[in-house]
Image (cartoon, rainbow, N blue to C red):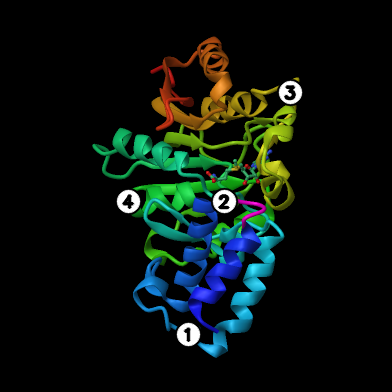
Amino acid sequence: MLLSAFLQRGMSALSLRYPEGEARSILSLLCGELLGTKSYTHILDPSFAVDPSREAELEEALVRLQEGEPVQYVLGKAAFFGRNFRVGPGVLIPRPETEQLCEMVLSACRETAEPAILDLCTGSGNIAWTLALEHPGACVTGVDKSSAALEIAESQLFSARFRPRFVRADILVEPDGFPAGGFDIIVSNPPYILDSEREAMRDNVLRYEPQEALFVPDEDPLLFYRAVARWAGAFLRPGGQLFAEINEDLGLSAKALMEALGFCNVLIHKDFYGKDRFVSCCKLQ
Ligand SMILES: C[S@@+](CC[C@H](N)C(=O)[O-])C[C@H]1O[C@@H](n2cnc3c(N)ncnc32)[C@H](O)[C@@H]1O
């Protein structure tokens, strides 16, 4: 089978679901991973043939993509902060905005040789691992309620020397299990999409990504921020910093909440789309 023929068929298979540019990038990612080809291989070499031993795998992947499964689940990996993270059913596919959250934490602890960092709602461990690998002195702990997520976080293929500690806990119940004031920084990307926003979302996100990683009830949109604030109250040292990703429509309410709960220097930060996306604050000295 010629690569160009597969790509042509792939484009028509995916065109019902994705805009042309996105369909092209998905196929390019798929062929890059499975065949080692570049996005332009079929143009430079129109006679390039797919290795027959990979054909079945490629066809099976195309069927899954056509059904709407995200390419990251089909490949079992997602790019984040320049590294490939294992992903699978049970964990959210890391989003590019969250790289900014990591940048903010890294710049906050640049001057600290061995910062103790707690990542609440760690999922695939993308934040925890990134901080541990980018700041080799950091001692990072990741917490999640989902065993499936923790299994994936533990299984990431990075140097064991920097491995964060992963702990199963439900952050909506009373904080427990860590030394009081033991962390310099708490970071979190908790569920923050309102139930009522489901309708506007792509059906492949709704069908494939874990709902408990995404949604909060409309009646209590800041549920997880109150929980994160309780954990910060218990485990952040005085003067320590809290960073969290937020729903773009809830910047002002998140800020008001953190101020009402006694945090200082509460700031809202925009993402690269210009949307309110992060809140940061400090625990009083
Ligand atoms: C938005 S995902 C974030 C995953 C990852 N940190 C990221 O940035 O891609 C939210 C995570 O919160 C976890 N979670 C949901 N409810 C939780 C709870 N009550 N306690 C702890 N973790 C929870 C989910 O399992 C999911 O992994």
Give the residue type that dot 4 points to: Glu
Compared with 206, 267 (above or below) is: above
Q: Could you say which quadrant of the image residue 149 lies in?
A: bottom right
The nearer-to-camera label among 3 and 4 is 3
CA distance for labels 2 and 4: 20 Å
Q: Secondary structure at mark 3?
A: loop
Whether tag 3 and tag 2 are in contact, CB under 8 A, the answer is no
Left or right: residue 122 versus residue 264 is: right
Q: Secondary structure at mark 1?
A: loop
Mark nearer the N terminus (3 vs 1)? 1
Give the residue type that dot 1 points to: Ala
Q: Secondary structure at mark 2?
A: loop
Can you identify the residue that label 1 sits on?
A: 49
The nearer-to-camera label among 1 and 2 is 1
Can you identify the residue that label 4 sits on?
A: 134
Please report the bounds of the magenta region as a residue range.
15-19
Whether tag 3 and tag 4 are in contact, CB under 8 A, the answer is no
Return the residue nearer the eye: 230 or 266.
266
Q: Is mark 4 within 8 Å of ligand 1?
A: no
Give the residue type that dot 2 points to: Ile
CA distance for labels 3 and 4: 36 Å
Return the residue nearer the eye: 88 or 26.
26
The nearer-to-camera label among 4 and 1 is 1
Can you identify the residue that label 3 sits on?
A: 218
Residue at (67, 25) in percent of width and height = 223
Q: Could you say which quadrant of the image residue 112 lies in?
A: top left
In the rendered view of the protein, which quadrant contains the N terminus? bottom right
Mark 3 Cα-neighbour bin, 10 Å: few <14, some 14–19, many ≥20: some
